[in-house]
Image (cartoon, rainbow, N blue to C red):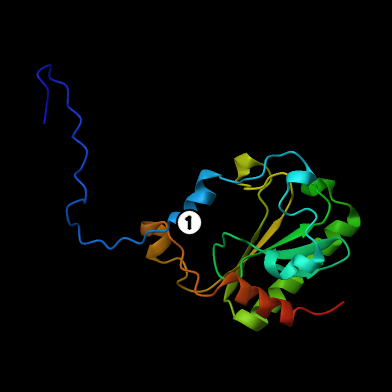
Amino acid sequence: MSSDDGNAAVEPAAAFPPPSDDLQRLWTPHRMVYVGGQDKPKDDGPSSCPFCGIDPADDERRLVVSRGATCFTILNLYPYNPGHLMVLPYRHVSAYVDLTDAETDELARTTQTAIRVMTAVMRPQGFNLGMNQGEVAGAGIAAHLHQHVVPRWQGDANFLPIIGRTKAVPELLADTRAKLAAAWPQH
């Protein structure tokens, strides 16, 4: 389609519903909260941080799996895979280099424990570990440092996230949390 002045014209918007293209659609409108940043905490310090000040009596509801002296583990509310944990210091700190020696040691040991527990409970074939420091590096909550521990299985990166921008998580977060918390070694 072209216009009288020789420039290509923009095609009109597609009719709704779109013509059949032999593709199934998986609608995940609940993800828009995450994608759109709704309720994302501002960098106003510990008072607005979703990780700071979680009452231990609220661990089950808030998906806290374990607690140590300086760090704790919590399930990711928007997991890449089933069992996606985060290991965090209690202290509201954004940079890895600002951790104390005790926090650094416990964060590393807790990450090892998370791998051992998930291996025993979920039998993953591998793991992704990582920290995104700063929004530009992909940190969703940049103000509070957190180490991701993501279990991986052969074929878990299938067509859903690539084509459908959807991740199938076959177990409720509360059920995953209960299994991991029950298998976590007591201090």
Residue 89, position in %: x, y? 80, 56
Residue 112, position in %: x, y? 75, 70
The foreground one among 34 and 79 is: 34
The foreground one among 120 and 56 is: 56
Query: Pointer 1: what residue?
Result: 30
Residue at the image position 36 percent from the left and 58 percent from the top: 163
Q: Is residue 95 left or right of residue 153?
A: right
Against 147, residue 67 (above or below) is: below
Task: Determine crowd level at label 1: few under 14, some 14-19, many 20+ residues with C-alpha closer than 10 A.
Answer: few
Q: Is residue 10 left or right of residue 36?
A: left
The total of numbered circles placed on residues is 1
Against 51, residue 154 (above or below) is: below
Q: Quadrant of the C terminus?
A: bottom right
Residue 67, position in %: x, y? 81, 68
Res. 111 visible in picture: no
Against 70, residue 94 (above or below) is: above
The foreground one among 145 and 153 is: 145
The image quarter containing residue 110 is bottom right
The image quarter containing residue 114 is bottom right
Q: Specify the farthest residue to the top.
A: 5
Q: Secondary structure at mark 1?
A: helix
Residue 182, position in %: x, y? 73, 81
The image quarter containing residue 174 is bottom right
Residue at the image position 52 percent from the left and 74 percent from the top: 153
Residue at the image position 86 percent from the left and 57 percent from the top: 103
Which residue type carries mark 1? His
Residue at the image position 11 percent from the left and 31 percent from the top: 1
Res. 53 visible in picture: yes
